[in-house]
Amino acid sequence: MTKLICIVCPKGCHLEIDESFNVTGNFCKRGEVYAKNEVTNPTRTVTSTVKLNSKILKMLPVRTDKPIAKSKMFDVMEELKKVEVNAPVNSGDIIISNILGTNINIIATRTIKE
Ligand code: SF4
């Protein structure tokens, strides 16, 4: 039996999942999906910054456009250290496409005009 706190919404249900992947404690179906993923292939949205050439800011906030396997998070952070972006940048622009062959993009989360 594994105990988890669901992080899908602010309610924070206390979940339990057994060896047969039966989930209890979830208020909704999303908690069941979260618990099963968490014990088989846990994922997280990565948020970070990359170097930015701009008159306004030195670092551009970015994130993955989908959750990525936790096992890849450190490799993603290493890739982000290699990136340098020139302004202007729009929120949602793809900064790195298909990072590490995952079909997940790194996108800007802030618009920088100059
Ligand atoms: S189980 Fe549903 S209601 Fe409970 S925290 Fe997760 S998403 Fe929210």
Image (cartoon, rainbow, N blue to C red):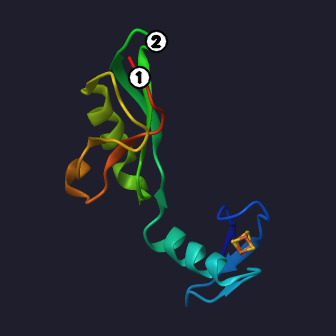
The residue depicted at 42 percent of the width and 14 percent of the height is: 58
Q: Is residue 1 visible?
A: no
Picture quadrant where residue 94 is located? top left
Name the residue tied to disc 2. 56
* 5 relative to 77, above or below: below
User: Which residue occupies the foreground of this view, 49 or 93?
Assistant: 93
- Give percent across and percent down for residue 85: 28, 25
The residue depicted at 42 percent of the width and 26 percent of the height is: 60
User: Which residue occupies the foreground of this view, 85 or 3?
Assistant: 85
The residue depicted at 43 percent of the width and 20 percent of the height is: 59
Q: Amino acid at mark 2?
A: Ile
Quarter of the image with the N terminus is bottom right
Q: Is the residue marked by circle 2 packed among few (<14), some (14-19), or many (20+) residues within 10 Å? A: few
Q: Residue furthest left?
A: 101
Q: Secondary structure at mark 1?
A: loop
Dots 2, 1 in contact, CB < 8 A: yes
Q: Secondary structure at mark 2?
A: loop
